[in-house]
Amino acid sequence: MIEAIVILGKGIEPGGMVPNLVRHELDYAIRLYGQQPIQAVICSGQYWGLAVNPSHATEASVMCQYLQPHLPAAVQLIAEDQSKDTIGNLLYTKALLDEQPWRHILILASVDHLPRIQYIAEHVFGHDYALSYHGHQHSYTVRQYLHLVRYERLAWWYARWFFYRLAHHPDTPWQQYHFMYHPNLRQRVVRRMIRRPVYPV
């Protein structure tokens, strides 16, 4: 029995709108509540590490606003609004969940990101949580797909390096490694790769 749903942010469209690739996950959460009594939905994300965010709205707040009219007050909507990438999404979300009784968690994301998300989640949540996953298959142009492949390759490399580093330096706070070495903040190659946003349909 799923107790809580985690939805990872993927940017904000102009005007503070939820992008299509996130709307599918939000709509799925709404449908799932009609099938079983979900106790909480955690929307995770401040804004992407390199995104320009003039509206000062966070991904988490925009997602919660989308969900609020469709879910009863009995369902807790929790905004995790500190993270700027997938690893941060899950680390900050776990910190919130550790304060709650829910241990059966469903993570929603696009199919293309699920293998990496599952790898990160297993390292972050460990054996204390029963995790399940659901992914939506998006449509891409050839250019968008090639962009995704390049970015996922780099993101996979960083995720493996990050948890290897933590395993060998367990006394160092994870934030120190993350903010010092995250590719979005440190490597110009990533800035070139993501100069133009990609919006799957």
Image (cartoon, helix red, strand yellow):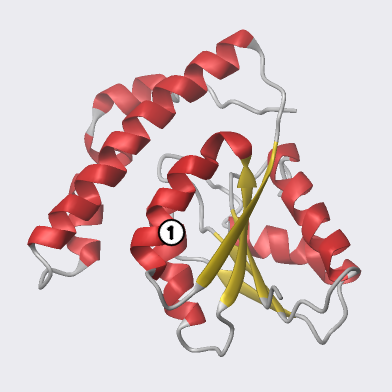
**In the image shown, does 114 or 127 lie closer to the viewer?**
127
- Residue at 17% of width from left, 51% of height from top? 164
Q: Residues within 10 Å of mark 1 (few under 14, many from 20)?
A: many
Q: Quadrant of residue 122?
A: bottom left
Rendered position, 85 above or below 153: below
Q: Position of residue 179 (x, y in %)?
A: 24, 54
Which quarter shows the C terminus? top right
Q: Residue at x 91, y 69 (%)?
A: 34
Relative image position of residue 13 (x, y in whole percent): 68, 40
Residue 42 in the figure: left or right of residue 164: right
Q: Amino acid at mark 1?
A: Ala
**Left-right relation of 180 to 80:** left
User: Can residue 17 be seen by looking at this rendering?
Assistant: no
Relative placement, left or right, of 194 versus 175 is right
Q: For the N terminus, give its image quadrant.
A: bottom right
Q: Nearer the viewer, residue 169 or 132?
A: 132
Q: Position of residue 49 (x, y in %)?
A: 41, 45
Residue 63, quarter of the rendered image = bottom right
Q: Where 34 falls versus 164 (above or below)?
A: below
Q: Is residue 132 above or below residue 151?
A: below
Please indicate whether residue 52 sits to the left or right of residue 142 in the image: left
The residue identified by callout 1 is 121
Q: Residue 116 location, x and y as percent? A: 44, 43
Q: Residue at x 73, y 82 (%)?
A: 39
Hey, which residue is sitting farthest top in the picture? Answer: 142
Q: Is residue 6 visible?
A: yes
Q: Which image quadrant is residue 190 in?
A: top left
